[in-house]
Amino acid sequence: MSLMSLGLVRGLIGQALGTAVGMLVIVLGRAIFGFDPIWSPEPAWVLGAVFGGIGFLLGVGAMSDWLFKWTRGIEAPLHHGPPLDKPAWTRYFGVDYNHKVIGIQYGVTGFIMLMIGGGFAVIFRTELARTGLQFLEPDTYNTIMSMHGWAALISILLGIGGMANYLVPLMLGAADMAFPRLNAWAYWVNVPGLVLLMTSMFFGWDGGWTVYPPLSIVGSMGFQFVFYGVFMVGLSSILGSVNLIVTILRMRPPGMSLFRMPIFCWAVLATSLIQLTGTQFIGLAFLMNSFQRLLGMGFFDPDKGGSPILFQHIFWFYSHPAVYIFVLPGLGIISEILPVFSRKPLFGYRWVALSSIAIAMVGFLVWGHHMFASGYAEYLRVPFMISTMLVAVPTGVKFFSWLGTMWGGRLTFPTPMLFVLGAISVFLIGGLSGPILGTVASDLHLHDSYFVVGHFHATIFGGFTFPFFAAIYFWYPKITGRMYNETLGKLHFWIMTPAFWMMSIGQMSVGVMGMRRRIADYDPALNVEVGQFIVTVSAFLIAFSILLMIYNLFHSAEVGQKAGNNPWRSRSPEWQIPSPVPEHSFANPISVVGEPYDYGLPNSTYVHMAGAGAGDD
């Protein structure tokens, strides 16, 4: 088998060729219209990036059915199963329309980006462990720090895509997603975007992940690669959200009303609504930045009637709701797993379901709290402060539900449950520190300090990373058919959780003492060196614990004990079918005849399949 038989390899070659074609078009166009010189690097690279993305999609085969068959009236039936003439593993390196394969592609790509972003964090955290410049120059430090931000955030988006694509159809008893071809296309458009994002480092960019103008307008050409790399990832989010919304609303089985739907599906629905309506704003902001650099437009230039504050409004109109894109699926995972290991019904199911929708709605009204120090009209501060505080209400509903679910339950503590409890504790740190930054007076004092860094990491780790690890451990037996090593799983938890507590609280502590974020050095007079050293050690411990998890998962896939179909005694539909999940997930249609979380209640059944009840507790 040659490398050229892998779609990924063909796609990367297609991206390289497309980039060359785009550059050639610019050169020829400038020559035809008499521009001197005919070579202009930035326009050439920008059009090359656009053509390169198209070339990748053509090379990988994501557009073959649409472009080469449907346009000529040729039927293109979906192929099910591994490629006929290749090893089964090759389907993960090419276009495949099975939602489970696409979910794993998303998840693995997201995990790789998480490792890259975490690696960048370890590098610049080592620089910050002591005062003075140790081994990184300021520009290099700023590029690595900025790349850490986007790599980590994109890893979350991809991880969400992995969980949603794999789990939602299984939880609904559906054969696949509503639009399988669009699903594959939405995944593969990420890859050329990630290539562009990584390429940006060779050109340098040091404006922080927010890429505010005017620095992103006058800075190095690396900013253009960031603009178009993030644009492609955002396009994936929009298309994926369309698919998930249609799947959830139109492909539920008989008897599964919205209020009989697994709570994770509610979280994904709320997340998808934000992605569909909000993601285009960050794409718009980045395109406006790009066009101002290329064409001299004055969107953010005060001398031409523009305003840098406009960029912040557009950017944060998406980027604060994006926080709820990041955490809502994780909060759904917590609510999904807690009843299983508490053996009790989910407390306040309907309130928890509607709280996700409420967070999605209120989340679009709070972007201005990122701009208290920006100089916008002062009369806007109080309304944004109040709306920010209102988000705590639906979030508090979830906390009360989790406590009510555990209260009086028959609790057990395997690794997934430990990570759920760790998520609650870490998310609580982020939640309690949030109102401090949502209040005008204290935010003006702490703005752009390390207190913000500590709050944000606690929110994201508690809202996504810990639940993501809980989900990996929980559904690992379903995906692989084998159990992970429980001892190593718990060791992962007991190393990572205290380390993160130290890291987040340490970051907030040095922030209160005056440590600014996004700087490579700091004044010894701040007396924060001990705190920075503790944060750095904590980062290394977290990295080690994740490497331990990777070893556990790979090793257990070969030698782990066979799991059986339902080791957790879950009521959810995906646990009523064989492990690992077969190519056609459900041999027979299912119907829903009860409530999803009636654990511990006698004679309760949730799903009915193949003529027999399933999910009795």
Image (cartoon, rainbow, N blue to C red):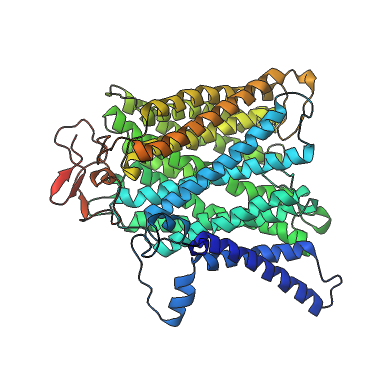
- The reply to whether residue 109 is visible in this rendering is yes
Q: What residue do we see at 67% from left, 30% from top?
A: 125
The relative height of residue 88 versus residue 454 in the rendered view (above or below) is below
* Residue 320, percent from left and from top: 58, 43
Q: What residue do we see at 59% from left, 42% from top?
A: 116
The relative height of residue 349 versus residue 176 in the rendered view (above or below) is above
Q: Does residue 416 appear left or right of residue 617 in this picture? A: right
The relative height of residue 172 versus residue 2 in the rendered view (above or below) is above
Residue furthest to the bottom: 72
| Residue 36 occupies quadrant | bottom right
Q: Does residue 404 appear left or right of residue 273 in this picture? A: left
* Residue 415, percent from left and from top: 38, 29
* Residue 193, percent from left and from top: 60, 56
Q: Does residue 257 appear left or right of residue 302 in this picture? A: left
In the image shown, does 541 or 497 lie closer to the viewer? Answer: 541
* Residue 166, percent from left and from top: 38, 49
Which quarter of the rendered picture does the C terminus lie within? top left
In the image shown, does 387 or 194 lie closer to the viewer? Answer: 194
In the image shown, does 265 or 447 lie closer to the viewer? Answer: 265
Q: What residue do we see at 59% from left, 28% from top?
A: 539
- The reply to whether residue 269 is visible in this rendering is no
Q: What residue do we see at 50% from left, 36% from top?
A: 391
